[in-house]
Image: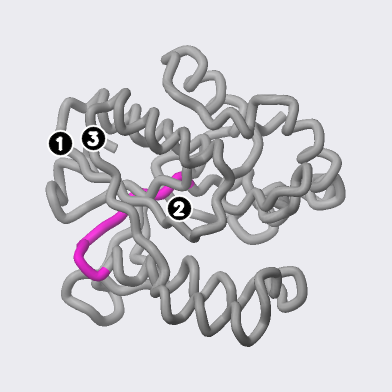
Amino acid sequence: MDRALDMFGSEIAIAFSGAEDVALIEYAKLTGRPFSVFSLDTGRLNPETYELFDKVEKHYGIHIEYMFPEASEVQDLVRSKGLFSFYEDGHQECCRVRKVRPLRRALKGLKAWITGQRKDQSPGTRASIPVVQVDPSFEGLHGGAGSLIKWNPVANVDGKDIWTFLRTMDVPVNTFCVSGLRLHWVRAVHQARVAGAAREGREVVVGGRHGQGVRPPQG
């Protein structure tokens, strides 16, 4: 984290999902260097995540830059496919509108970004994630292939250790992940976790609410 912030200064930012990647913000604070944070507000986050955003801003004295989907694109999507099309089309179109395009806009102004991606989140798709890489999917400030560096400082860290760190440092956490709702979550994603793909089960309905954007503690 210190190396990333030192190398890129104001041209790097932390991507905060409102889950255990609050650890990234704590790590950044511990470096003593200035840092920026952005988050994607899909419009479908649960109340606990919005509460965490507020707590994190107050706890660290920072302003999170929220990226929103284009209203016209959301309107067109809902008019043509309804409010819950993500249950039927594998999330693809919904994610393009609510996540991918806002993320592209956020990254266009940067030379590098910091994520909370870890190998243990999805052994099937993230097993080989490096700590530092040229971003294979997005473009940065100057455009074109290779224009954006992606830092994954906790790539090799176990989820249990992340949560131990958060509890030790006594930082704000998402109550959705640590309350009784977790019991419902574990049942809902049981098959995905057995298959070694905990992350793939994160966008589910829990207790009648859509839990998009957060994941439960590992273990």
* Percent x, y of residue 203: 67, 55
Q: Nearer the viewer, mark 1 or mark 2?
A: 1
Q: Quadrant of the N terminus?
A: top left
* Percent x, y of residue 204: 73, 54
* Percent x, y of residue 95: 55, 70
Task: Give above or below for 102 relative to 210.
Answer: below
Residue type for callout 2 = Pro
**Left or right, 113 with reference to 196:** left
Residue type for callout 1 = Pro
Compute the Cα span from label 3 to label 1. 10 Å
Q: Residues within 10 Å of mark 3 (few under 14, many from 20)?
A: some
Residue type for callout 3 = Ile
Mark sitting on residue 130: 2
Q: Residue at x 51, y 78 (%)?
A: 75
Mark sitting on residue 62: 3
* Percent x, y of residue 43: 50, 59
Q: Nearer the viewer, mark 3 or mark 1?
A: 3
Q: Secondary structure at mark 1?
A: loop
